[in-house]
Image: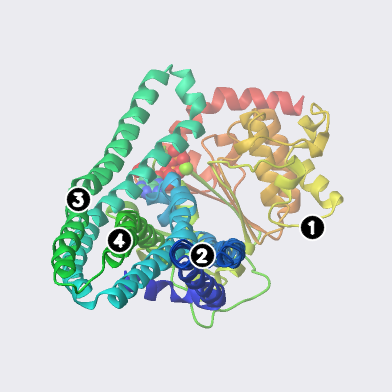
Amino acid sequence: MFKTFKAMRKYYKPFKKYAIWGSIMTLLFAFLAQVDPYVTGLIIDKVLVGEESDFVIVGSIIIVAITLFRTVLRYGFFISFEKFSQKIVYDLRKDLYKKIQSLDFSFFDKTPTGNIMSNMTGDIEAIRHFFAWITHVSIFHGTVFIFAIIAMFLINPLLTSTLILIVPFITFFSLRLSRTVRPMFKNIRDQFSKLNRVVQENISGNRVVKAFSREPYEIEKFQKENEEFKKRNLDAAKVWEDNLPALDAIAVLFNVIVMLLGSIFIMKDQMTIGELVAFNRLLWMINNPLRMLGWLINGTQNFIASYDRVSELLGENSNIPVLEEPVTPTHFMGNIAFKNVSFHYQDLPVLEDISFEVKTGETVAILGSTGSGKSTLISLISRFYDVTEGVIEIDGRPIGDYDIPTLRNNISVAMQDIFLFSDTIEGNIAYGVPGANKEKIRLAAEIAGVNEFIHQFEENYNTVVGERGVGLSGGQKQRIALARAIIQDPSILILDDTTSAVDMETEYTILTELKKINANRTTFIIAHRISSVKDADLILVMDSGKIIERGTHLELVNKKGFYYDVYTQQMGEFNSIKEVVNG
Ligand SMILES: Nc1ncnc2c1ncn2[C@@H]1O[C@H](COP(=O)(O)OP(=O)(O)OP(=O)(O)O)[C@@H](O)[C@H]1O
Ligand SMILES: [Mg+2]
């Protein structure tokens, strides 16, 4: 617990004034709780026994005033601790979000979205609950407990000392309980993540689920995790129930000691009956905090488990090392060289000894069977992953020398797996260039062929597309992604299978338009169609992570190898499109 507190210091320290004020008000609130029984006692003694009837009025006024004051105090400390907690989690959430933004592809490869979501929601809530609630409840009950002990001590020191002998048992009990429930709360939080993951995946994949009529299976999958979540919660609750008898035993022990010793003291005239009655009332003030102990321990352990998970995420670091003093040219020429580049995804070798060079303004096309490593190859240029061996140079410098934002601002990628935000079409196109004027957006849209279909939407460029671009066809999404890449006016443009879903005629128009604006730009085109790659300055043919053929279209056709085979297979299609285009 102290470890967690130490680790969280940076978050609560700036707001400790709220905790201090809150604590003062809580202490006062707990202290004033003693006044009511005390004054009531006085009224009974003075009015009933002493016959000072005036005291009824004075006593009542005191009780009402104190009660009102306590209400104000309660409001005060509730607000104080609420503010304390909200400010802490506000900063924590901000840091978490920043951390998530800073992490690279390999983190997202291994971390399910549902886990991150549960960090941002459930775990943060457990932390907030601790600072907003567990804090003042502990202070209040702790104070009441101590006050009660002091009051008892004033009445009868000997009897109270005997009772204090039980305190080590309570301590032992609390420690044991907290040790038992701690891993359980970690399990609960982990299971909550799992449950989140199942729900998140199900909702994202709802179309697949429906297409395969797998609803029953999905329900069963969810139920399994839901069941486990319930079980883990009940297990934790059970620990508490198992320990209740021990707490009851302590409470009974208190009573027995008080009754037994109290009677002896009374018989020996060392205590009055009135004192014994008061003692008994105070016992309740001791037992009540003990009853709360379980809740407080649970809440604290839940907090620790949640913070552990959050700090695990905060401790994640990007695998892409960042230089202290990187080079930050404003513009790249776009000369690229791969020198003996190999790459492994963890243990899986994907690229082997890749070498080639491209000059400014040239177009490189990459063709190859599925899974041959084309997308992986181009992801290395933007440093989404770092090479395992070899080096990639841009304008004669290893890409590791550049500042990452500079590097990525000069490279535009239209990725194979297209993601559109739930925003307008215009907003999606201008994503990388916030504040781009309409003219610029229209121009990019025109080159990418977006203008061809935009009129089918009533609101044209202001049409809001659904999550991930729902409401658009595959080819429409690709063209928006292409416009999003073009508008950045990058030195290096990478198109990963970007025209695969548009018809060949549209593809031809798009590639022709692109050629016009690409004179000073290095372009990578990954494609499966010969028609998309044949005009490139260099064509790389890949298979199983290696470049098996390279050259221009003519050279490769004459070589009569893999490329030639693909070419002859596709030729029929290719010729017919030529006829269409050339009229
Ligand atoms: N994030 C990843 N983690 C681990 N392995 C991966 C990852 N991405 C791809 N791979 C593996 O790397 C290999 C190359 O994948 P890549 O996506 O580069 O192929 P590709 O040539 O682009 O294929 P396609 O034509 O189907 O797009 C595949 O065997 C794939 O399973
Ligand atoms: Mg690919």
Q: Secondary structure at mark 1?
A: loop
Which residue position holds label 4? 277
Label 1, label 4: how far apart the Cα atoms are: 77 Å
Question: Which image quarter is the N terminus in?
Answer: bottom left
Nearer to us in this view, 535 or 484? 484
Tag in front: 1 or 2: 2
Q: Secondary structure at mark 4?
A: helix
Instruction: Please identify the quarter of the rendering in which residue 479 is found.
Output: top right
Looking at the image, is 126 positioned above or below residue 334?
above
- Where is residue 155? Give x, y as percent: 30, 74
Which residue position holds label 1? 435
Colouring of the image: rainbow
Give me the residue at 35% from left, 33% from top: 226
Label 1, label 3: how far apart the Cα atoms are: 62 Å
Tag in front: 1 or 4: 4
Point out the tag, 1 or 2, that comes first from the N-terminus: 2
- Where is residue 179? Give x, y as percent: 21, 60
Do labels 3 and 4 touch, CB within 8 Å?
Answer: no
Residue 17 visible: yes
Residue 243, label in figure: 3
Other-residue count near label 1 (Cα within 10 Å), few / some / many at <14 / 14–19 / ≥20: few
